[in-house]
Image (tube, helix red, strand yellow):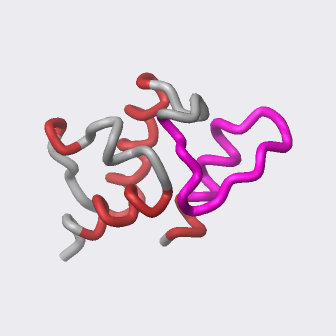
Amino acid sequence: MKDVIKNYVIKEYVEDDTEITYDTPLISGGIVDSFSMVSLKRFLENKYKIAIPDDKATPEAFDSVDKICQLVGNYLK
């Protein structure tokens, strides 16, 4: 799951040769903005067949691949 999310972030949001790791700050580092966070949430919900409540889709929860994996894991059956 980590590599799927990391590769999606790189493909969709990284415009240069920025190195992304599992703990790279995505929101606070300026790689993913609030609009992009919505599309990332939609990608995760479609990919993993889950529903992430809006109140759980916070900038903090989306600030790294590791944190996103923790969030998604909470909703996997």
- The image position of residue 44, as x and y in percent, is 39, 53
Q: Is residue 32 above or below residue 2?
A: above
Magenta segment range? 6-27
Residue at 52% over, 69% down: 2
Q: Is residue 33 above or below residue 41?
A: above
On-image quarter of the C terminus: bottom left
* Residue 50 falls in image quadrant: bottom left
- Confirm whether the magenta stretch covers residue 57: no
Q: Is residue 17 left or right of residue 46?
A: right
Closer to the camera in the image, 66 or 14: 66
Q: Is residue 53 left or right of residue 58?
A: left
- The image position of residue 55, as x and y in percent, is 14, 37
| Residue found farthest to the right | 17
Residue at 57% over, 35% down: 29
Q: Is residue 9 above or below residue 14?
A: below
Residue at 70% over, 46% down: 11
Q: Is residue 25 left or right of residue 13?
A: left
- Confirm whether the magenta stretch covers residue 14: yes
Closer to the camera in the image, 20 or 76: 20
